[in-house]
Amino acid sequence: MTRTDRQRWLFPSHLVAPAGNGAARPRRTVRDWIVDTSLFLLAAFVGLLAADASAQYTSGTVSLLDQLAGAAACCALWLRRRWPVGLAVGLCLVSAVAPVAAGAVLASLFSVAVRRPFREVAWIGALALAASVTQVFVRPDPTINVGLALAIGIGFILLVTAWGMLVRSRRQLVEALRERARRAEAEAELRAAQAQRLAREAIAREMHDVLAHRLTLLSVHAGALEFRPDAPPEQIARAAGVIRDSAHEALQDLREIIGVLRAPGENGDGDRPQPTLVTLDALVDESREAGADVVLDSTVDDPAAVPAATGRTVYRIAQEGLTNARKHAPGTTVTVTVRGRPGEGLTVDIHNPAPAGPVPHVPGSGQGLIGLTERAALAGGRMEHGPTPDGGFALHAWLPWPA
């Protein structure tokens, strides 16, 4: 049995059928049929008791009319879901002269209390009370005291009305909880989608920052081999070695990035440590071995004392700056300056002059600088970049270094 089938058995029709102005009127569920049949039988039982009691002090014609009115009132209860207010008003008027309709009045009053707001319930309840009082004087029962008859009628009406309002409040609570659950589920899906998007963006930034440097080395040296096939064997061997080493490093970096997608504990014990400011010298040496002219000017006495996250950001900024200089200004001297101390923060300046001649187009859209700017902002710092008056390019970043 599916969930919808269980709802058809357990819930009222207004909770099972879809809501909306264009939705069709909900059909009775199995539960609705059980409730409606039970109310019909209960109203008929109360009507029979009232008919039997009134037959002792009324004529046969009046008793027959009472029975017909009671039967019609009980049968009209099948319309209580479609016209609860109109049915309740009509039955109240009938009950003023026909005691056998008392059970049907109570059932219709219960339906109004369940389905209508308090204002409608109040005036219909007042009408039912007035009809009950009128019935005591129009069709008095000589076997019961007038005060007791009034108390019984008023008590039953108030009890049924309170019961119906309680059911209505419980249904509203259930609907509110269901709506809250739907909103919570929708919000959870949105949060999951946002988390996935942020994770994809973080992985994309990391892949660009790490792999762009390695792939640029591969491109430069492969281009050199392509345009200098007559180079000495030593230079060819050196370029081939750099290509091999860069490809190996790129594969290692790619494995580290893919490791971000793995569950905790899946990474092996042999994973390489993340780069920090301590490994900045190795990055500069690697660029120099690739043929770049790099000048490193650092006044940080103890690079290991720099927080790992800050050092890693400095490393990525320097890596991106060297990669861009190699792509867009090959053959120029790149100056990397690192200054800072605890409490003042770290500043990174990367500058390269304009290239001496035309530079072949290298694929790239500046996404690395955008990602680094965001990375620096997330670290609590800032980064600026742009062309310089001499035609070169400069990059300046500041990152916090707590005391």
Image: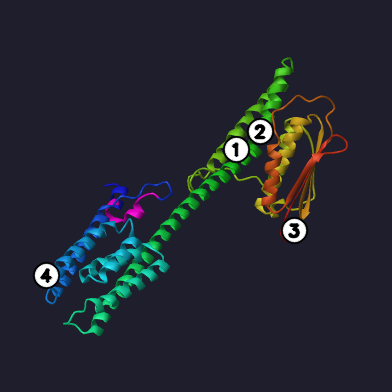
Residue at point 78%, 29% (across, down): 330
Q: Which residue is mark 1?
A: 253
* 386 is within the stretch colored magenta: no
- Marks 1 and 2 close (CB-CB < 8 Å): yes
Residue at point 76%, 24% (across, down): 360
Q: Which residue is mark 3?
A: 342
What label does residue 340 carry, if any? Answer: none
2 or 4: mark nearer the eye: 4
Q: Type of residue at label 2?
A: Arg
Lateral position of residue 7 relative to residue 61, left or right: right
- Marks 2 and 4 close (CB-CB < 8 Å): no
Instruction: Return the residue nearer the eye: 114 or 385.
Output: 114
Q: Residues within 10 Å of mark 2 (few under 14, many from 20)?
A: many
Q: Type of residue at label 4?
A: Gly
Q: Residues within 10 Å of mark 3 (few under 14, many from 20)?
A: few
> Where the C terminus falls, by quadrant?
bottom right
The answer for how far apart the CA atoms under marks 4 and 3 are is: 107 Å
The answer for how far apart the CA atoms under marks 1 and 2 are is: 9 Å
Q: Position of residue 123 (x, y in %)?
A: 39, 70
4 or 1: mark nearer the eye: 4
Is residue 238 at all visible to an observer of this figure? no
Return the disc, 2 or 4, that comes first in the chain's sequence.
4
SS for callout 2: helix
Q: Which residue is mark 4?
A: 60
Q: Which residue is mark 2?
A: 214
Q: Type of residue at label 3?
A: Pro
Q: Magenta: predominant secondary structure element?
A: helix
Return the disc, 1 or 2, that comes first in the chain's sequence.
2
Is residue 247 at all visible to an observer of this figure? yes
Q: Which residues are magenta?
A: 8-18
